[in-house]
Image (tube, rainbow, N blue to C red):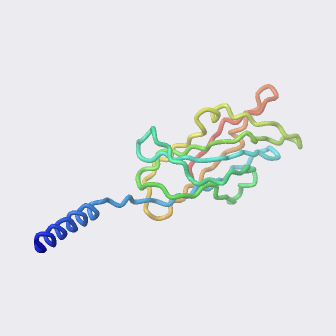
Amino acid sequence: MKTKFALGTAVLFLAVLSILSCKKETKTAPIQFLLVDKPATYDSVNVHIVGMQVQINHDTAAWIPINTKDSIYNLLDLQNGITTVIAQDTVPVGVLQQVRFILGDNNTVVVNGTSYPLETPSADNSGLKVKIGRVLAETLNTFTLDFDAALSVNEENGVYKLHPVIQLR
């Protein structure tokens, strides 16, 4: 009886060990996004970034939120090699297809000392998307996004609108 119990316990232990050893470990990749700007003729261009999401592989339904500093960035402070980290997190390894900026309501442009609201019609519903298309490594993946304020801000009948032009460097 003791032999059958010991044999049964050993078989059960080996079965559990076998199942646990078959679990695949999900590999992750640390990512970081930097923001930079090309020169523009405005006094300031302030963009309120409240969040960011990434799309890995071709999973169009799954946007992964990443740790983002909710802040207002004056794009003109980010010129001549100056960058700032706006998001940093760890995501599953794969192909980083796109990143999506979630913008807040405090977007402004300052022209000749006067501040104007900066409308963001293209980012209101789905966020502001930038295609990346890069394979992520298991080491730190840094992406510098060049937000071109000069090309992104347009004045239409006294209303300033943000039509973002962002390039991956």
Q: Quadrant of the N terminus?
A: bottom left
- How far from the left and from the top, in percent, is residue 169? 57, 53
- How far from the left and from the top, in percent, is residue 67? 59, 54
Which quadrant holds residue 125?
A: top right
**Between 74 and 16, the one nearer to me in the picture:** 16
Which quadrant holds residue 108?
A: top right
The answer to whether 154 appears left or right of 116 in the picture is left
**Between 147 and 124, the one nearer to me in the picture:** 124
- How far from the left and from the top, in percent, is residue 156? 76, 27
Q: Residue at horizontal 64%, vertical 58%?
A: 85
Q: Residue at horizontal 57%, vertical 58%?
A: 88
**Between 58 and 151, the one nearer to me in the picture:** 58
- How far from the left and from the top, in percent, is residue 81? 68, 60
Residue 84 against residue 162 in the figure, above or below: below
Q: Residue at horizontal 48%, vertical 45%?
A: 55
**Between 32 and 144, the one nearer to me in the picture:** 32
Q: Residue at horizontal 67%, vertical 58%?
A: 84
The answer to whether 22 appears left or right of 93 in the picture is left
Q: Residue furthest right?
A: 113
Counting the numbered discs, the total is 0
Residue 12 against residue 124 in the figure, above or below: below
The answer to whether 29 appears left or right of 115 in the picture is left
Q: Residue furthest top?
A: 157
